[in-house]
Image (cartoon, helix red, strand yellow):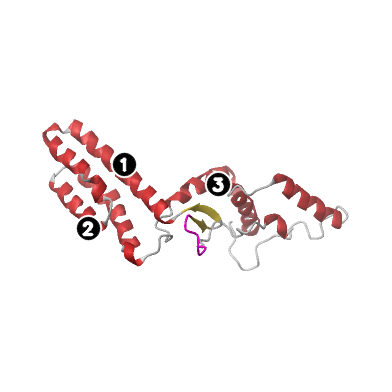
Amino acid sequence: MATVFSSGNRGDLGGISLSAGMSRATRLGGLVVQSGRAAHESTLASHKHALDRLLKKLCGDDPDRRAEYELLRGRLDAAFTGVSFWRAFVADAHAVDTRRLSDWLATTGAVVEAQFARRGLSTSRSLDTPLSTSPMDAFVTPIRDAIRPRAYALKNRERTNRMLMLMQLHANRQDAERAYAKHIRQWLEVNRGRPCVPRRAIVDPGGSASLR
């Protein structure tokens, strides 16, 4: 029955593996997701959009400083191009002395700077270097939501991993119900309609941690 679970993407969702030579996609725990420059730009774009919305709102809530907020909005594109531009932007934004803006920079802004720090200089890394795992959310969230209602019943790690492999195939759009049924039928026909292994053969190895 091993072929039922084999798709070239084996592995449970707990691990992270990076396949070499994948410039547009990366395999994270077997799930094929966007990575590298595209993923990083997507993440920074969401932060930039959130900061722009905050500055726009502050323009309406604090008209006395509207000119300063508008000036900061005009510098957003440059600020998100690199750490040196970002730090200069942050220093000037803090100088405006607005608590809501400073709080955003101290929290989400710290995440932005950390991303810049982790990626290093553009001249020292290849274009396919993964810079963010945020694209995983779109894949992991549906799986998490599907499992959550029955999470209390998942006590066998080995069987749970096999279930996750099937969900992994579905997330990668590589699942095939007819192929799955065909493998089961062929396996049963070879064994005269009966499984050749004990009913509870898939159990956690003795001494290993289970999900209990």
Front residue of this view, candidates 120 and 187: 120
Q: Amino acid at mark 1?
A: His
Q: Measuring 40% from the left and 60% from the top, which residue is drawn there?
A: 127
Front residue of this view, candidates 30 and 107: 30
Q: Single out the mark in the foreground, 3 or 1.
A: 1
Q: Is residue 199 left or right of residue 109?
A: right
Query: Is residue 104 among what the camera can see?
Result: no
Residue to which mark 3 is pinned: 143
Q: Single out the mark in the foreground, 3 or 2.
A: 2
State the CA–CA distance, disc 3 to disc 1: 28 Å
Front residue of this view, candidates 101 and 115: 115
Q: How many other residues sit within 10 Å of disc 2, few (<14), some (14-19) or many (≥20)?
A: few
- Position of residue 2 measured from the top left corner of the image (x, y, whole percent): 71, 60
Q: Measuring 13% from the left and 48% from the top, which residue is drawn there?
A: 95
Q: Amino acid at mark 3?
A: Ile
- Kindly check if marks 3 and 2 are in contact, taking CB atoms under 8 A apart as contact: no
Q: Residue furthest right?
A: 192
Q: Secondary structure at mark 1?
A: helix
Residue to which mark 1 is pinned: 49
- Vertical comparison of 61 with 199: above or below: above
Q: Amino acid at mark 2?
A: Ser
- Position of residue 206 measured from the top left corner of the image (x, y, whole percent): 65, 67
Instruction: Tell whether position 140 is magenta.
Output: no
The number of callouts visible is 3
Q: Tell me which corner region of the image, top left, top right, bottom left or bottom right, holds residue 146.
A: top right
State the CA–CA distance, disc 2 to disc 1: 20 Å
- Position of residue 208 measured from the top left corner of the image (x, y, whole percent): 60, 66
Q: Main secondary structure of the magenta part?
A: loop
Tell me which label, 3 or 2, sits earlier in the chain.
2
**Image disc number at residue 84:** 2
